[in-house]
Image (cartoon, rainbow, N blue to C red):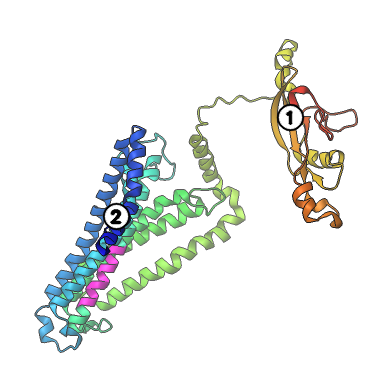
Amino acid sequence: MLITAGVFIALFIIATITAPFWINWLWFGSMGYRSMIVTDYIGVTLNFLLGGLLATAIFYINVRMAIRNTRNESVVRENRMGRFSTSALNLIGSIGSIVIFLIVGWISKDFWREAWLALRADEFGVSDPTFDRDVSFYVFTLPVLKGIQVSLLWIVGITMLAVAFVYLVRLGVRFGRWGDVPFVALRHLSGLASAMLLLVALGYILRNFELVYSTRGVVIGPGFTDVNIVRPLNWLMAFLSVAAAVGLVTGYVLRSPKWLAGLLGGWFVLAFLVTPLLPVLVQRFVVEPNEFSREEQYIARNIEMTIAGFGLDGVEVTELTGQDPIDPNQLPADEPPLSNVRIWDYRVVTPVYQQLQSFVPYYEFTDIDVDSYTIDGQPVQVLLSARELNIDGLPETARTWTNRHLAYTHGYGVVVSPVSQVSADGWPVMIVRDVPPTGPPELAIER
């Protein structure tokens, strides 16, 4: 009995997990697009494996290297934590690698469509005026590059923490005392720090391209502050990050802790004080007092790219001066559209409907729609609004359960008036009106 129950439970779990696959498989197959679902699953699987394996390789290789580097020195150093056995650290490293493989793989699996689009992207034939790159770069390539940069930065950062932990427990390293850090640990950690700095530099370069989405100015896109302040600052931060990375790799910094402290201190000041604050100050005190003059060319660029984005750059523009003489022979041909030119504003008509056609306090017209109907064989553009029930308009004594749920349950009828007609008294011409509704047969309300 227990075996049978276990089998049924296992089958139920398998069916629950695989149900989405079989539903998609059968549905796409019935539509003749089974190859699409196959491509989707292949892409998800490949991205899961590639992302997970890359992250695992970076993490596991560095942790193993740290363990190997400390095999001999851990025996020499007197350190209670240094008694961590190699097998224990290998086990921790293996478990950490598996966890990273699963987490990064799971995050990467849904990234395959973006990567596929970037690899097969075709040019739009339109370049942005700031960086002179085709629009396809921002639509397809930039999101992928940004995702890779951020992911690698996290992976290398976590790896660096794990490696520092190995050196800490094996060698008793006191990272607060520079002279106490063994050269083997310093060299390894500086290499990982250099990799992080290079990825940070790449992030600053990508930030420049992301300025096309900036909302700092009066229009979306790079403005005066972005082009003249933010972009140079990003290039400066990228250069300093690369310089620090090269210094760490070549070892110059390792020989001079003060130089390293000065470089990193300057980097942090620029990254967390100057870079965030300077653009805000320039925007507030330089751009905003003379905004149109500063932003004029960037507003023109925004208009130009908006026109191109909506496909309006091929529209033929004709200037109508209103000075040309009217051709009497043309008027009959223009009569149908001219007769439907809207002269009534719905904001004006709404209170008119309410005053003339509500009749009782519990009827109201909440909004007005614009529609077109054929009346007497001609298309007529009209304003119309339903006469709806407002239960709050009932007297307090009439708001009983019976009235609210059985008697007063809905409104009654509509009011319709042509958009271009005015009565002799200056009111809209209501062609459908009153209770019960009256009007032309084409607009008869049957229910």
Left or right: 280 as drawn, with respect to 47: right
Sequence-first disc among 1 and 2: 2
Q: Amino acid at mark 2?
A: Leu
Image coords of residue 89 (percent x, y): 17, 75
Q: Camera-side residue: 44 or 405?
A: 405
Q: Is residue 220 visible?
A: yes
As displayed, is residue 416 above or below residue 327?
below
Image coords of residue 23 (percent x, y): 36, 43
- What is the quadrant of residue 125 in the picture? top left
| Quarter that holds the N terminus | bottom left
Residue at left offset 85%, top offset 57%: 396
Q: Secondary structure at mark 1?
A: loop
Left or right: 336 as drawn, with respect to 55: right
- What is the quadrant of residue 246 in the picture? bottom left
Query: How far apart are the alpha carbons under marks 1 and 2?
Result: 56 Å
Which residue was labeled with disc 2?
A: 11
Residue at left offset 32%, top offset 71%: 263
Which residue was labeled with disc 1?
A: 446
Residue range corresponding to the magenta coloring:
154-166
Q: Is residue 291 magenta?
A: no
Image coords of residue 107 (percent x, y): 33, 57
Q: Is residue 155 magenta?
A: yes
